[in-house]
Amino acid sequence: MDGLLCRTRLYFHLSCLAILVIKVEYDHYFVVTKHDDYRRSLYSVLVSGYILFVVLLFIMNCCDANESIAILANDVSRDEKKFLIYDVNYGEGFNLRRDVFMRIANTVRILRERGHNYVLVLPPWGGLYHWRRHHLKIPWSKFFHIQSINEFVPVIEFHRFLKETNYDTIDEVLYLQGYAEGWTGGKYEIKYDRRNCISNDPHYKFIDGLWKGWFFAFENVYARKFSCISIQGDSETLANMIQKDHHHANSLMIDRAETVLHSHFGDFHYWEARRSMRYAKHLRLVADEFRQERLNSNDVRDGTLLSDSWKTTRKEHGEAQGGDYICVHWRRRDFVRSHSADIPSINGTAKQIVVILRKESLTTIYLCTDAPIAEVNTLISLLPSDTQVERFLNDSSLIDGEVSIVDQWICAHARYFIGTHTSTFSYRIQEDREILGFKPEKTFNRLCPDGDDDCEQPARWTIVYKEPSNRY
């Protein structure tokens, strides 16, 4: 039974009980005393107590708001609630997973617009390949403000989904894959088919009549049905498939969701999903305190104030000025091996930083990097002596994903940003800066490889807002 409905019924019965108690007490004192003033005083106290009781119940019901399912608009179906769960390939990093969320969130948006009451189940974080500390079962509220996401589509954390459904078996798992034969005639075609599984790796095992998989390291979670789906398509393709072939499942899991593309990359639906992903308040506070204390940067001075709701926030390019520092996202480690042709040497990086500092008339750098400390020290030694280099050094109180967001939020507020080619970490900073209202030329920049000072710069995917005349 739906958890919210259970609580509502409980509160209704408790309220009725409170009314009954008031009636009994009032009748009792009416018999004991005939003094009108005393009766009126007693009645007032009892009624006030009842009102306080109801208010407390309401507060209790709202305390879980940051993790609960959103209250929905009147034009959305009130049919039986269905849950859409998803997961992403193990090897994908934190910032690409954030992009996959937007694709699946738009699938849910499309289904809801068609009258289907789907709720998106947020997959717990953990066990990511790039994270140095392998935490598991991390809720989204550790990184993001859930109520903001709820303003785009209704979402629920996975552990709360299990409680909502009394740990019932997931109805069906769809494992997405490409086509074994590739593109027909070399042409990309929107389509999907149930096929034999291409991978020989047994991601799911059939045990005692049920399917057992990873399920985010949660025990005693199983699925009734499992199948592999070859698909070429986007968020809308997935919505069509679910509506046509899998609408019977009250809980449906989409694995390898990164296989699905954006329906219209960079349109206002894309940006609404992205704008809804506001960072958790405690992480913004950590980053903002660092900016103030180490970089003399704050939102009032920098022109980066945001409204409480992303829906009422609309910044024009150039409104944001940023703090008196540049941010450099300097990706190293695995990029030195896998993208060596696209990134500069340490010496080449230093030369480009010096040029930017002179152009912006600044002397302070916020350095965001995964480079070993020896490489960082070498880079600093190649910069002018009056250059101030700041880094956020975690004291172990924050986990890896939290540190990433603090880094990104500080970079998002810099006067000028330059990132690393093809890095999704840099992409997310560019999006943050678009939301804040920076000029594109201060945002869409990359470090060039040695010997190529005029290398191709990032595509300027600037923010798009829904015009008032548009309707979902």
Image (spheres, rainbow, N blue to C red):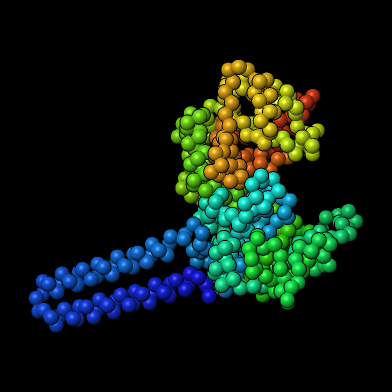
Residue 451 percent across, percent down from the top left = 79, 24
Q: Is residue 425 visible?
A: yes
Q: Is residue 246 visible?
A: no
- Going 70% across and 21% down the picture, which residue do you hit? 351
Q: Nearer the viewer, residue 47 or 402?
A: 402
- Going 47% across and 31% down the picture, which residue do you hit? 293
Quarter occupied by the C terminus: bottom right
Residue 300 percent across, percent down from the top left = 45, 34
- Going 81% across and 61% down the picture, which residue do you hit? 201
- Picture quadrant of residue 194: bottom right
Residue 87 percent across, percent down from the top left = 68, 59
Q: Nearer the viewer, residue 46 or 315?
A: 46
Residue lying furthest right: 185
Side of 424 where 25 appears, left or right: left
Side of 311 where 107 appears, left or right: right
Q: Is residue 382 above or below residue 170?
A: above
Residue lying furthest left: 35
Q: Nearer the viewer, residue 197 or 103?
A: 197
Residue 323 percent across, percent down from the top left = 52, 30
Number of marks in picture: 0
Side of 292 where 372 appears, left or right: right
Side of 241 where 157 appears, left or right: left
Residue lying furthest top: 385
